Image: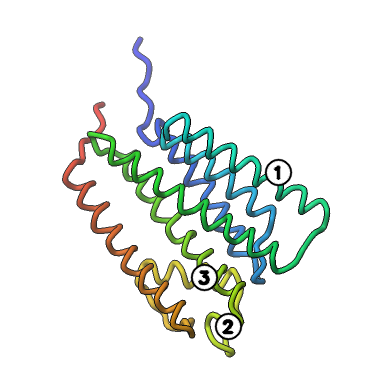
Amino acid sequence: MHAQPHHPILESGYWLVLGLLGVSYLLCATQTSLNPNPIALLYQLFTVAATLWVAEVKTSARRAGWLALAVTGLATVVVHLAGLEGRLLDIVLSATSMVAYLVAPMAIVAHEFRKVTVDVQTLLGAIAAYVMVGMFFTFVYNLISLTTPTPLFGEASHDSLTSQLFFSFTTLTTTGYGNLVPDAPLVQTVAISEAITGQLFLVIAVAKFVSGWQPQPR
């Protein structure tokens, strides 16, 4: 009696990455202040660590990444338990999240371009990387907001991690509802860069997926 073949989605670790990303997104979406949550950061670091494993990063690089994430995570726990707070801490947490969401999609893209065949795993990886790009720009906006006196979206709009997350993904997908408009030249430049990145990512990802698609054997 032959064993039933596994579904291609279940054979890929990217389903795990996408699940972790979904929770990470929700944690950011519930933060109605500018200050990043240390617990959310720990979860994000765990998501990045899982991504490095799934993306089959070289052992030496993966261990170095895990070590850096572990040290940062331990420091975050100590800070949280000690009840420390302040603008400098918020900046460090925001910058750490930004770097984490920069490294993770780069690892995914490198992994997918090393593969000869394109399949469902490639699609899952592309989706995960695309979402992480949106998360990366979210923390770019957050870091700018924490380090500059000018409100990100002007005096009339409430600035929070939630609004920055919303603005990031509407910019990445070029949806552009127009309810949040960047008020400073620096933020406008970052928004333009994100919109271009989002479109280039989709064009390249779709081109690779269509040109190299090979259905899984039954």
Above or below 39: residue 141: below
- Residue 151 has which mark? 2
Residue position marked by numbered label 3 in the rendering: 141
Nearest the eye: 35 or 11 = 35
Give the structural element (helix, strand or loop) at label 2. loop
**Amino acid type of disc 3?**
Tyr
Kindly indicate whether the residue at mark 1 contacts the one at mark 2 (C-beta within 8 angstroms): no
Q: CA distance from mark 3 to mark 1?
A: 25 Å
Picture residue at 67% right of the left edge, 67% below the top:
35
Give the structural element (helix, strand or loop) at label 3. helix
Kindly indicate whether the residue at mark 1 contacts the one at mark 3 (C-beta within 8 angstroms): no
Query: x%, y% of residue 52?
Result: 47, 38
Residue position marked by numbered label 1 in the rendering: 74
Query: x%, y% of residue 215?
Result: 23, 35
Above or below 43: residue 91: below
As drawn, is 180 to the left or to the right of 94? left
